[in-house]
Image (cartoon, helix red, strand yellow):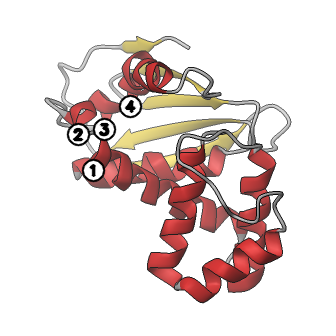
Amino acid sequence: MKGIVFTELIEMVEMNLGLEIADRMILNANTPNQGAYTSVGTYDHMELIRLVVALSDATQVPVPQLVQAFGKHLFGRFAELYPQFFTGIDSTFEFLPLVESFIHVEVQKLYPDAELPTFRCEQTDERFEMTYQSSHPFADLAEGLIQATVEHFGDELKIRRTDLGEKNGTEARFTLTPSSVPESRATQTCLN
């Protein structure tokens, strides 16, 4: 997993909860490098899990809630760092299909060794479905990113998550239902 994810988690904790909690999280996670991450480094995803579990112990906030909050934070940071991904995009339904077909392609150019999840999308007049699949159990992170996308574009959408497969966070379907959908919206798909 790319180091930017680790550095952003630590930065989020420092900003929102303070240095003491960040230090306690790092110390109690007992990671091999004691929290010394670089944004371009590559680290075992289990270290991120250990950090979040340690943060949960320090704050008494459930792990899924923390990971979703981190997903929202990451979206905000990605919007700041990579504004080109948002140029000419006006809605959640325009943006989400681009994650797999455009954004992940660009991320792979920047970080050729990045292990990215896959997303399959399907859109009809009644709903938008995005299926997350990864070798890592970060469906909560994907959910936070999707929630932040909806908030960013100011869309009025309901998000329903259905865990799939082994129900261990490696596969989930997110169904987004708008309060109203323009009739002219055609069915679209994005490939995995």
How crowded pointer 4 is (Cα within 10 Å; few <14, some 14-19, many 20+) is rated as many
Q: Position of residue 74 (x, y in %)?
A: 45, 53
Q: Position of residue 95 (x, y in %)?
A: 31, 31
Secondary structure of the residue carrying tag 1 is helix
Task: Name which of mark 2 and mark 4 comes first in the sequence.
Answer: 2
Along the viewing direction, whichever of 132 and 163 lies nearer the viewer: 132
The amino acid type of the residue labelled 4 equals Leu
Tags 1 and 2 touching, CB below 8 Å: yes
138 to 95, vertically: above or below: below
Give left or right: position of 75 versus 134.
left
Tags 1 and 4 touching, CB below 8 Å: no
The amino acid type of the residue labelled 1 equals Glu
- Label disc, if present, on residue 96 of the rendered structure: 4
Task: Please name the residue shown 23% across and 40% down the image.
Answer: 83
The amino acid type of the residue labelled 2 equals Pro
Task: Name which of mark 3 and mark 2 comes first in the sequence.
Answer: 2
